[in-house]
Amino acid sequence: MAVPSDGPSVEEIEVQLEPYPLYNTTFTLFRLGPLYYGNNTQASNIFDPALLASHAKKFHSLLKGDVLRGVRVGLAAADEDEGLSRMGALIKCEWRVIGDEEDWIRDQERNADIEREDEPSFVGDIVTENPKAIHVVIQYEKIEYVALLLKDTRIDEVDEDDGFAKLPLLLTRMPIGLRDTFTDFLHSTFDTHAAQLKLSSDFIVESLERYISDLIATGPSDVDIAELVEERVKDIQIVFGFGAGVAPLLKTLDITVSRADVWRLVQRGQAILSSKNGDSADLYIPAPSKRKRANLEASQLDRLPLVASLGSYLNEHLALDLSSKHIRIVRVACGAFVLGSEGKLKLLQGIQADEVTRRAIDSFMASLSARATNQEEG
């Protein structure tokens, strides 16, 4: 006769773990100015749990549409033109600090057996020694929305002496009405400004090439490069957009490079650049001095081997000149991410990825933070 278990098994607890919030979600990207929290003298830094709990409670009240001085305020008081009224009742609003992926899994496992439905929903109980982001969760009866305020991973400290903190990259998954309410709350609370992060063709394609380069540079020396690229990069999809004067009836053109062809294209591009520039064959990623050009408007064909090879092929077979100012790259997708010029991002890797892939993704996210910071300074 089977003895009933007193609680969930280890396997059941693992199934219940929440996925790391950065992955497998389509986010809209924003650049975020410095956040001022200095008027709260009890907060030691922007990641102070008591500070975040206080803001979570205030934002929760705003979303509920509480009455302030006889006037009903908040999202619930506005016209709900995006189906917000069909989301059901607001269950919780939580602001918490998260670290990297390993911290997330470790804290989830530690807290899984002590979670209770009647615990306060405002205070996250995840504590990390290396904060990476503020994770905002807005849960309704029928749907959950999230936002992430990410630190610049190139910088150890986000806080400054004057009471400002730098979290330059904001990721949101919210309908427009809720998102506007959230960014307005950030503005009124932290005296900051959020603006959607638009991405140029150069940045999009450089992100793809840099990701492949980082995989190759940090990968095991005993692994075949072609096999490494095929397994980690997988198929590549590139979407080209056209100006109205070039092809009025052609909006976009999707091109897919199979995983088996990616490394061959890279090698061919290296040969093209080596012959054209007179440099060595090891031209996969531009030298730092070349990458620091502020305008990023020079043709990618002179710098990046995958694009150089693909451009040569398209010019020969389709008479498509990628150096034309009327042709732009509006989206790329590979095994690790989808990135669009309109400021959309989806990371596809998770905890199952190995250390090499994680480092390459971390480098990619650092470049996004740098892009957000540079646009803010510009």
Image: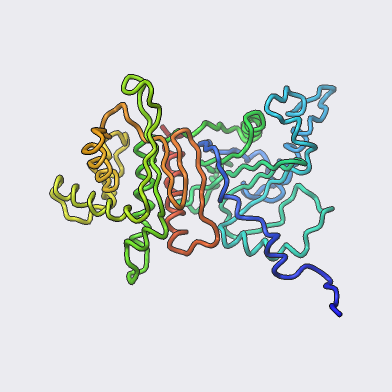
Please say which color scheme the image uses.
rainbow
Quadrant in which the C terminus appears: top left
Residue shown at 60% from the left, 50% from the top: 21
Residue shown at 84% from the left, 78% from the top: 2
User: In the rendered image of this protein, does residue 142 appear above or below residue 11?
Assistant: above
User: Image quadrant of residue 104?
Assistant: bottom right
Measured as percent of width and height from the top left, residue 291 is found at 30, 44
Residue shown at 54% from the left, 45% from the top: 161
Choose between 367 and 50: the one closer to the eye: 367
User: Image quadrant of residue 40?
Assistant: top right
Measured as percent of width and height from the top left, residue 349 is found at 51, 55
Choose between 88 and 363: the one closer to the eye: 88
User: In the rendered image of this protein, does residue 217 appear above or below residue 161?
Assistant: below
Measured as percent of width and height from the top left, residue 327 is found at 32, 30
Image-based side of 188 in relation to 85, left or right? left
Image label count: 0
Quadrant in which the N terminus appears: bottom right
Measured as percent of width and height from the top left, residue 267 is found at 24, 54
User: Image quadrant of residue 163?
Assistant: top right
Choose between 162 and 133: the one closer to the eye: 133
Image-based side of 204 in relation to 104, left or right? left
